Amino acid sequence: MGGKGFIGVFDSGYGGLTVLNELRKRLPQYDYIYLGDNARAPYGNRSFDVVHDFTLEAVRFLYNKGCRLVILACNTSSAKALRTIQQRHLKEMDPSFRVLGVIRPSTETIGSYSKTKHIGILGTDGTVHSNSYGIELNKFSQGIRLTQQACPMWVPLIESNKHISESGKAIIKEDFLSLIEKDPEIDIVLLACTHYPLIAPYLEEISNGRVRIISQGPIVADKLKDYLNRHKTLQHQISQKSECLFLTTERPEVFNKSAENFLSMKVNAEQVKIS
Ligand code: DGL
């Protein structure tokens, strides 16, 4: 594909907006396409094969829309689909097209944040049970004691806007406390699901200063900035009009309302079919 193109940002739903927000703060000059597969979210409890197939459909769709680079702003997709897509599918599609995930940049960075070297991870069932964080962290920060907690209800609660209800908050609190009680020496908790920064203020309230809560958006944005500086050919292929297009597989009215709440800007999403 010739000419300039976009940076694609993909998530099963709204979570990737927390990454997009940080990308647009640090790299405001570029053009972005955000795609949320809201109609099929959550991905967290789905099998490897299904997450792989859904993610590949999204990646192909974004490539055909003119993206030169796609960030899988979804830990579940990064854990279950990224490697196969990078190793098997990109070559057939276009060897100059790039797909990057969120786990590697997080594990490269997070070890240096902890004084006790005891780190807690909150993620979807899929992310936690893939042990991708355990495997990747071992490569970059040896000697870290990692404790993980799957929070299977959090994405469904956030996608349906029920995380603010009393029953939703009770579930969130129980999972959060169960993580930090498993290892009292944890000083850093990584929100290893891009939906979770949407409830970070509530998590801070529960933590009450006991642990530092880290969101991935700023880490991913810093790493992408660095990556583009090191990959000039790709950098020059991305158009720079500071535009952002929002696409969703669900009804746009629903997407717009949630996205506007989070991004504090007017959002006019388009509904698309990706399968
Ligand atoms: N934001 C996705 C993640 O980072 C949520 C996955 C899901 O849909 O369960 O894992």
Image (tube, rainbow, N blue to C red):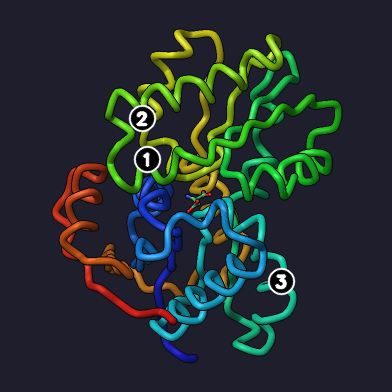
Closer to the eye: label 2 or 3: 2
In the structure shown, which secondary structural element does the residue marked by tag 2 occupy?
Answer: helix
- Label 1–label 2 contact, CB within 8 A: yes
191 sits left or right of 164 in the view: right
Between 71 and 31, the residue placed more toward the observer is 71
Pointer 1 residue Cβ closer than 8 Å to ligand 1: no
- Label 3–label 1 contact, CB within 8 A: no
- Label 2–label 3 contact, CB within 8 A: no
Three-letter code, disc 1:
Leu
Q: Label 2, on which residue?
A: 168
- Residue visible at 35% across and 68% down in the picture: 33
Q: Label 1, on which residue?
A: 157
Q: Residue 145's spot in the image, x, y percent?
A: 79, 24
Give the Cα distance between marks 3 and 1: 30 Å
- Residue visible at 25% across and 51% down in the picture: 259
274 sits left or right of 134 in the view: left
Between 170 and 136, the residue placed more toward the observer is 170
Closer to the eye: label 3 or 1: 1
Q: Which mark is residue 84?
A: 3
Give the Cα distance between marks 1 and 2: 7 Å
Q: Residue 49's spot in the image, x, y percent?
A: 65, 69
Three-letter code, disc 3:
Thr
Q: Residues within 10 Å of mark 1 (few under 14, many from 20)?
A: some
Q: Earlier in the sequence, mark 3 or mark 1?
A: 3
